[in-house]
Image (cartoon, rainbow, N blue to C red):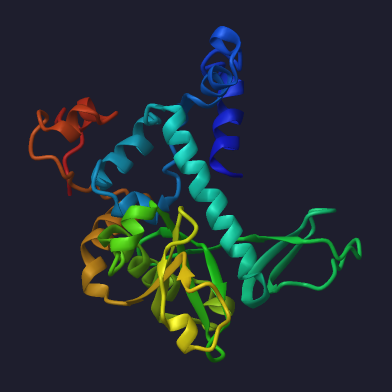
Amino acid sequence: MNFVHALKKNSNQNGKVGTGGKGVGGGLKHFLHSSLAGEREARSLATIHASEVTREDPKFCPREIALLDITGKKRESEFLSTSMSVVFELGWRIQYMVTDWLASIAVGDWTCRKCRNVAAFCSRPSACGKCGSSVRWDYEECRFESTVTGISAGIDVLVQLDGPALGVVEIKSIDKDKFKTLVAPLAEHRLRTNLYLRVIAESGESHRRHLIDTTKACVLYVSKGGYGVKDTSLKEAGLVDGGYSPFKEFTVERNDEETDEVCTRAKLAHDFRASKVMPGGVCETSFCPRAKSCPVLKECFSGSYPSQ
């Protein structure tokens, strides 16, 4: 389910999206704003997602996970403006579009658009084994979970391009002006992609894991402006094209030292769920900005749950 659809689904249930689609003043612009702005439920922490442990604000805290489990509390929902909703949706749409362009070399799970039958971990089928339809298929992200840290990672697309091993590809859309100056993957994208490789290698999915190259991955950037930048390599490669490319690709080499810190914190939360050993937190005092927004601030500093 894409971002805006999830937002609408959640909001229609709790009645928190704008004015329910009633455009103030009757214009289309106001209708769209009233439909798209609204509350988004906080992501469940039952699974420890890679995006959760690698983000800087708020910093991932294993103690928060443990105390949320104990108290049954949840993080508060967040308000997303129309602008942010559109940004997220455009990113998802571009990822879907690029994945569809890569479909002939992609390997993963495929959902038949006619009967919703799923063909598991394979190249794109020529026809559905259930209904026989040859209509287009929807590619589904392959998800892996580390047996060591419990971190879960959804891979944008796996491709078979060079050699027998499947390559990990992360697709990122970026503003056209930032795209022009991009000379390396952004730090957050490099760290998260690096972590994905580690998660795959540590996963229990042996039937899939051994087919994937976990030593390196590709971060593929797509310019939201379409044209991108001049690229002489196209002509040098003998490609008949317009000389511009909206794509830049960078290789990320796996380096576990760079992900040790986030994996250590995730493992503390993972181990708590197995052994109930209470981890320490990341806040030095109850007055720091992160602590003030924490849903278990009171419990964390109450003295009732000493770290072990």
In the rendered image, the residue lying farthest to the bottom is 163
Name the residue rendered at 22%, 48% in the picture. Answer: 279
Q: Nearer the viewer, residue 182 or 205?
A: 182
Question: Which image quadrant for residue 96?
Answer: bottom right
The mark total stands at 0
Residue 88 drawn at (x, y percent): 47, 42
Where is residue 205, by image quadrant? bottom right
User: Front-most of 75 and 128?
Assistant: 128
| Residue 274 visible, this orientation | no
Seen from the viewer's position, the closer of residues 150 and 224 is 224
Q: Quadrant of residue 215?
A: bottom left
At 28% from the left and 39% from the top, the residue drawn is 64
Identify the residue at image location x=48%, y=84%.
235
Q: Is residue 108 above or below residue 166?
A: above
Q: Is residue 11 left or right of residue 288?
A: right
Task: Give the vertical position of 183 relative to 154 (above or below).
Answer: below
User: Looking at the picture, does residue 35 appear above or below residue 96?
Assistant: above
Residue 218: x and y, percent?
Answer: 42, 73
- In the image: residue 218, left or right of residue 27: left
Residue farthest toward the top in the current orientation of the protein: 25
